[in-house]
Structures are given as C-alpha cells and as structure tokens.
Image (spheres, helix red, strand yellow):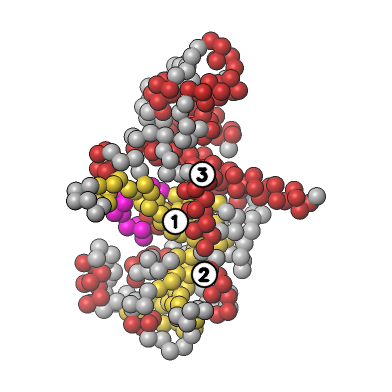
Amino acid sequence: MFTQMRSDELKEKTRKSEKDFRRNRKIGFFPLVALILRMVRKSTQLELDEFREMFMLEEAAKTTYTKQSFSEARQKLLPEAFTLLNDELIRAYYEDGEFKTYLGFRLLAMDGSVMELPNTEETQVRYGYTTTYKVGFRIARALSSHLYDVENKLVLSSCLSRYDDNERSLAKRNIEHMLGLETAPVRNLILFDRGYPSAEFILYLQEKGISYLVRAQGSFYKEIVNTSLPDKVVTIEISKARAKELKKQGTPIAPGTVLHVRVVKVELSSGETEILLTYVNAEELSYEACKPLYFKRWGIEMRFDDLKHKFEIENFSGQKPQIIEQDFYATILLSNMASVMEQEAEEQMKES
C-alpha cells in the first residue's frame, strides 16, 4: 500500500485538476495524503507543525505551512484517493488466501448507517436532511453503506450517499465494487437485515451468484410467510399484478419470472419466529447452523459503534462535501489498518 501511495498513478487518478501537484509546493501529494490520514479531524497549527518536523524535516526548516495552505491543498485532492488505498489494502490482505472463514465462506455483512453532517445549506442540498419538531428546522444527514467482513474485521467497500437514497441500491454498489477487487474466486456469503429483501434484490443476488442469508419481514410474500415446515424451498412467481406493483416501486421484474428461495424459520428465545431466506442448500448450510450464522451479523453493528465513538467518523474537519468525503473514506481506511495491526498483534501473542 505504501508503494501505491507514492505512485504517479494514484496522483493522476485522484487530483482534482491536471494542473494540481505539477510544481513543487509547500507540501506535495504524498505528504498531503499522509497528513490527512494522521489528522483526519484535526487541523490545528500545532498538529501541522508537528507532522512537518517528524516527516518533512528539510521542508520544515525552509518554509512555513499554515492551516490555510493545508486547506487549499486539500481542495485539490479527490476523496477517491482513500478508497483506492483501501482497495490496495483489501487486495493485499486476501491475495494469499490465508484469512478467516466461517463454514467455508468469507462471511460478510451489509448494512447502512445514518451520518450526522455539518449542518450547512450546501450539505443539506448535497446529501439531504431531516426535519425536527421545530417547524422548518432542518438537520443535514447522509446515508452510508458498508460491506464488512465480520470474521476478519475489515470494511471491503463503503459509500457515502444521500440521506434519502435506497439501501438496496447502495448495497449493489458495494457488491459490484467488491467483485471488482477479487483477483481469484472467493466463496462469499452476505448477511442482510430485514430492510433488504425484495424480489428484485433477491433476483440480483442469485444472478450474481452471491450466497446470502437475509431476514424477511412477516409481511413478505405469502408463499414464504405461509410455509408450515421450518425448512423448505419455495417458488415465487411474479404475476402480472406483482410485476405491476414492482414497476410502480421502481424495481421492475418481467411477469412470469420465477424465484426459488429456501425459507428457514427459527424460534427465538422471545417466542418470536424469525424468517430467514437463503440461496445456500441444506448440505452446505444446515438448519441448525442458520440461527447462529445470522447472529454473526452483529459484528457490523459493533463496527458502526467503533467508527462513531472510537474513530469519531462524524467529527469532520471541514464543512465542504469534498472535505467531508475525504474524512469519511480516510477514517474507513484507518479503521481497516487498525484491524490488520490488531490481528497481527493477536497472532504474535498466540505465538509467544
């Protein structure tokens, strides 16, 4: 990843203009990226001076570097710099095949999280907003989506979008991004909460060959809800009436399309019956394994808690969308780097 960070290719892909980072300035492309990573939410003059004295000693002796010049330099850098660096980390981590699996799968979880943003007119227009009990009072918010490896504690893909965006659409973006990173076939199994299932989304997953386990709402298709057996493969046919309704919802499926879904019903300690849908057969995923497998999804909730409270992902260092997205994706990268270091430390402790 360090080599990629220095490469001209990364600079070409992530500078805002062809004119940016051409001439030698007070701070170059690589030190700027490293500085943002080091002080994602900080912009004090003390932090800037400390960084220069530690990593840019010769430049620090020749020139000054103010908060204003740092802010101006950031305007030239696209947030994609940090997603590309995260891609390199993810590729490197999985390339040797020596990563934790669960029941033979790389176990992933998909979920969204609402992000509180600096409340400006620009952020409200760009990302959307919610209203409060005070009439006309708006609070800027965004919706983030994350595809997370719950066993290896890594965010494979994430995106920051409008507050009113569709979680299934963002999930597809993350899945497509993940598939683009894979250099060798990987058996992925993705866990989804009950906000995700729809005929169109299930069809998408099955056409992509993605194994999944998703919790269904009690109001889902009657073929699923009315099954009397705890474990059964059901057939859902998209009738003309269903196709019309799906088209109205913006998720069109041709009439006559048939879906085959395995329905697993498990009883919780509360007495409630949980409905789980999957594309994995009983030989690979037994009925008994489904309940504890779905509870593995809790790992992504813990990651959200870490991002918000330990990494302070909502504590942005600026109000402009470009700065907000730099901070967001830089924090995702930092959290992944911390996970890798944590795992290496655990391995060393086991060995000793």
User: Which region of the structure is painted magenta?
Assistant: 159-169
Residue shown at the point (25%, 43%) measured from the top left: 125
Q: Position of residue 322 (x, y in %)?
A: 36, 35
Amino acid type, label 2: Tyr
Disc 1 crowd, CA 10 A, few/some/many (<14, 14-19, 20+): many
**Residue wearing tag 2:** 294
Residue at the far bottom: name it: 228
Label 2 or label 1, whichever lies nearer to me, is 2
Please report whichever mark, 3 or 2, sits nearer to the chain's N-terminal start: 2
User: Residue 324 placed where, x, y %?
Assistant: 38, 38
Q: Amino acid at mark 3?
A: Phe
Nearer-the-camera pick, 144 or 91? 144
Badge number at residue 175: 1
User: Which mark is first along the chain, 3 or 1?
Assistant: 1
Quadrant where the N terminus lies? top right
Secondary element type, mark 2: helix
Q: Is 160 one of the magenta-colored residues?
A: yes
CA–CA distance in space, label 1 to label 3: 25 Å
Given this view, does label 1 or label 3 mark the residue nearer the observer? 3
The residue that label 3 is drawn on is 311
